[in-house]
Image (tube, helix red, strand yellow):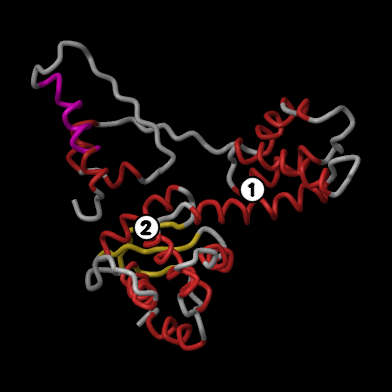
Amino acid sequence: MPGTSPEEADDSKLLMQLSRAGEENDVDASITVVGISNDLKYGDRLDTRVESSFAPDEIVFPAYDANQLGDILYRRRDAYHEGVLSEDVIPLCSAFSAQEHGDARRALDLFRLAGEVARDADGDQVREEHVRAANDDAEVTRVQDLIRGCPTQAKIAIAALAAMDEFTNQSHFKATEMCQVYRIFAESIGTNVLGQKRITDQLREYETLKIIDMTRTSDGYREGTYLELSLLDEASLLLQSIGLDDQCSQIPIDTQMRQQIVGLVGR
């Protein structure tokens, strides 16, 4: 199946075997398969034969809202001494977290970081300004941590997409456009250039991590379908974080490079 990674092909094969095990008398017992993923598009990339044979029922659990996150944080208020939290800390932590991701773990991280900001400022209480400062710091730290763990090839591809977003008036780009800029970046620092399928397969992990979005779309019969990429994080922050890598910091993002990127996009 076009666009399917080796891991997804293996998953398709396993699900196909499990769904047909009873029909082929491989097992005597009933089989129930429960699959859990935070990638809502995962099933779309499996072999189409799996959906027919496996016939899964999908259940989507929505992200936590501000009230639910507030309940979770309220139960953890004993992490602070009595009287240390101002009344607006938990509601603000909950609101920030609900607006951005609805993730309880990250809400708890923000709750903790706000206390650390207050402590470093020698404050006697955790207040709104500490939450706001912690939220700004947490986003920078999150992106830097994610980028730090990326393979070099993925960093170069993300840098290409971020540069396209930063230096043009567009926010959505064809995979073929990204690969052209990726090739220029990779060659500029003497790195091997991967083909389009291999580099987009690498980027799928960062779709799951909510750094980028990848959507297969169409411009009609003449153009056919193509893979469209866009950023879910701030382009300048991604470029700054990738620039911390010794090798990627050598990519010459100068005026000439910017003009070359603008010339490539949307041709």
Give, as a single range, the part of the protein colored magenta. 11-23
Residue with the most extreme left position: 24
Q: Is residue 170 above or below residue 204?
A: below
Residue 266, quarter of the rendered image: bottom left
Specify the amino acid type for callout 2: Thr
* Residue for point 49% across, 51% down: 210
Q: Which residue matches tag 2? A: 215
Q: Which residue is drawn at 39% across and 57% down?
A: 214
Which residue is pictured at 24% across the width and 18% down the height?
31
C-alpha separation, residue under disc 1 versus residue under disc 2: 23 Å
Amino acid of disc 1: Gln
Horizontal side, residue 74 vs residue 126: left or right: left
Say whether disc 1 or disc 2 marks the residue closer to the N-terminus: 1
| 4 lies above or below 252 | above
Above or below, comparing residue 71 to residue 117 in the picture: above
Q: Which of 231 and 256 is in front in this view?
A: 256
- The kind of secondary structure the magenta stretch mainly shows is helix
Residue 158, picture quadrant: bottom left
According to the image, label 1 marks what residue?
Answer: 99
Residue 229 percent across, percent down from the top left = 40, 63
In the rendered image, which quarter contains the C terminus?
bottom left
Binning the other alpha carbons within 10 Å of mark 1 as few (below 14), some (14 to 19) or many (20 upward) gives few
